Amino acid sequence: MDMVPASAEPLLHPEQCQLRPSDHRRWWVLVAAALLLMLLVTVGPLHPMLFGVPQSEPVALILLTAAQEKGAVCLDGTPPGYHLQRGSGDGSSSWHIHLQGGGWCGTVNDCSNRRMSDLGSSKFMKPIQFTGAGILSSDHLQNPDFYNWNKAYVRYCDGASFSGDAEGQAEDGTILHFRGLRIYQAVIDELMEKGLANATQAILTGCSAGGLATFVHCDDFSARFSHKVSVKCLVDAGFILDVKDISGQRSFRSLYGGVVHLQNVRQVLPKDCLTNKEPTECFFPAELIKSIHTPMFIVNSGYDPAQI
């Protein structure tokens, strides 16, 4: 497994990870906005290419309505979804599958609240654009290695890193569907039918909670292809540590404990780990990585605000 230094540039924008900027950066955002406003006043409207970010058409949301029969649904029971942008040229047989991030829910109350957003219901999901910098960009200058690959952006709406398989009940009596594992399987199955099965090379990536999902599913993803296909995985900002934070608490252990037990994540955890350790501990990347055989690249900040 490869790790990049803490000073490396992020591979994905915060919105692609569903993370909010930390407070200490918001002041700089306001300053930048003020400078941009001054520039607009003095030189007029900016051309889309001025900052190297080309305009692109929104990529529509594809809902897996047929997957509902298999129980592959978001927290509120709506069908899961993904966005697919077809590749071109020498990238037409290459595939990039990205698992969206967006935190976790480990209690009935948290999951119940989550279903009222795009992280728990496809009712709130909108089209996306593959723009800007990073490995999801369609700009050959920003993303020379992957810009013309087939790109599938899998929406996250289960709250357990595409890993749970259970049901719960909200306080109002409605059912909470913890079917992340079924969502992952249904999306990959459909993509295989749409050309992924004929890929000459494929990469599975994820950010934050999607990064944890990439740890969980990396080998399963690789096993879907013949040994002739080049398959790799990449995790961005998903190496969550089981350590004390600045409050002196193991906050992620508490959170993951709730996720593992509430959403029945145990079935996707390494059997060797479960033999000697508690399921919650086995959900951390430090344990998951021990059983991964597929080539994997990991990038993580040495000062991740979410873990401090």
Image (tube, helix red, strand yellow):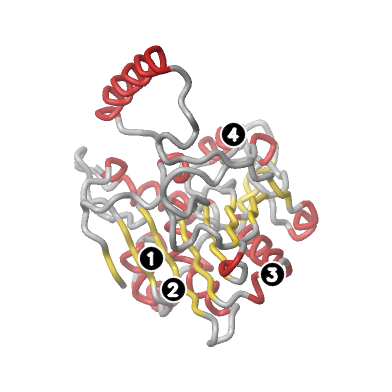
Q: Which mark is residue 117?
A: 4
Q: Earlier in the sequence, mark 1 or mark 3?
A: 3
Tell me which amino acid carries mark 1.
Cys
Closer to the chain start, of discs 1 and 2, is 2
- Towards the viewer: 139 or 117: 139
Q: Amino acid at mark 4?
A: Ser
| Mark 1 and mark 3: Cα distance apart in space | 34 Å
Q: How many marks?
A: 4
Q: Which residue is mark 1?
A: 282
**Could you tell whether 203 is left or right of 235 in the image?**
right
Q: Give the amino acid type for the residue marked by disc 3 in the picture.
A: Gly
Circle 1 SS class:
helix
Task: Name the kind of residue labelled 2 in the image.
Answer: Pro
Residue 15 has which mark?
none
Give the mark nearest the N terminus, 4 or 3. 4
Q: Extreme bottom residue here?
A: 227
Picture coordinates of residue 137 (x, y %)? Answer: 49, 50
Of callouts 2 and 3, the N-terminal one: 3
Query: Residue 90 in the image: x percent, y percent?
Result: 57, 69
- Whole-angstrom CA distance, mark 1 to mark 2, is 7 Å
Instruction: Name the quadrant containing residue 182.
Output: bottom right
Dot 3 falls on a residue whose secondary structure is loop
Q: Which mark is residue 270?
A: 2
Q: CA distance from mark 4 to mark 2?
A: 31 Å
- Kindly identify the residue that appears in the image at 61 percent across and 71 percent down: 93
In this view, 102 is above or below 286: above
- Local SS, label 4: loop
Provide the residue designation for mark 3. Answer: 195
